[in-house]
Image: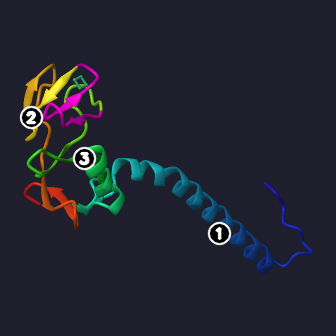
């Protein structure tokens, strides 16, 4: 135990001790916040993780639909393939194959959606035609046309 310096008044010692306690306490709280914040962020994902319920294609994406036959766009964390069939109807399907997650493409010449990884084939409404995919591709609602504006959204949203 440290003996107080008789030359320092007791009130000053108390004041120094209080200051040290405040500094140590705030350091401890800061340290706890640095430790807990990432844990809490991990345990509670952001409310907007899936993004909004709709998105409008950019001019560049609409151009890709016309020139390349399809475009892959994002709606929140979802990748969506948007394409125009031979009858000029716009379709929007989940772009992630339900087998092992490869990105699908639209094959205009065959009129289907194709996964190159294991030759999975899907109909234009997302149903599995052949190959290993266990489930259909999720479909998204589509409004508009390539000449003006295309808005896609989650079904039922
Ligand atoms: S990942 Fe698409 S068919 Fe296997």
Q: Separation of disc 1 and disc 3 at Cα?
A: 54 Å
- Can residue 77 be seen in this snapshot? no
What range is drawn magenta here?
A: 103-118
Q: Name the residue beneath numbered marker 1.
A: 22
Q: Separation of disc 2 and disc 3 at Cα?
A: 15 Å
Q: Is residue 15 left or right of residue 149?
A: right
**Identity of the residue furthest to the right in this view:** 7
Q: Tag count in the figure?
A: 3
Q: Position of residue 156 (x, y in %)?
A: 7, 57
SS at circle 2 = loop
Which quadrant holds residue 23? bottom right
Circle nearer the viewer, 2 or 3? 2
Confirm if mark 2 falls within 8 A of ligand 1.
Answer: no
User: Label for residue 123?
Assistant: 2
Q: Residue at x 27, y 31 (%)?
A: 101
User: Label for residue 101?
Assistant: none
């Amino acid at each position: 135990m440290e003996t107080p310096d008789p030359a320092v008044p007791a009130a000053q010692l108390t004041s120094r001790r209080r200051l040290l306690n405040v500094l140590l306490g705030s350091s401890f709280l800061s340290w706890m916040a640095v430790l807990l914040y990432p844990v809490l962020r991990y345990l509670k994902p952001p409310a907007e993780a899936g993004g909004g319920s709709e998105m409008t294609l950019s001019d560049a994406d609409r151009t890709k639909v016309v020139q390349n036959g399809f475009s892959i766009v994002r709606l929140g964390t979802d990748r969506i393939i948007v394409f125009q069939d031979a009858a000029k109807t716009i379709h929007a399907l989940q772009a992630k194959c339900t087998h092992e997650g490869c990105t699908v493409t639209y094959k205009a010449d065959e009129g289907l959606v194709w996964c190159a990884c294991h030759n999975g084939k899907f109909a234009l409404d997302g149903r599995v035609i052949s190959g290993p995919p266990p489930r259909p591709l999720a479909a998204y609602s589509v409004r508009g046309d390539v000449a003006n504006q295309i808005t896609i959204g989650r079904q039922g949203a």
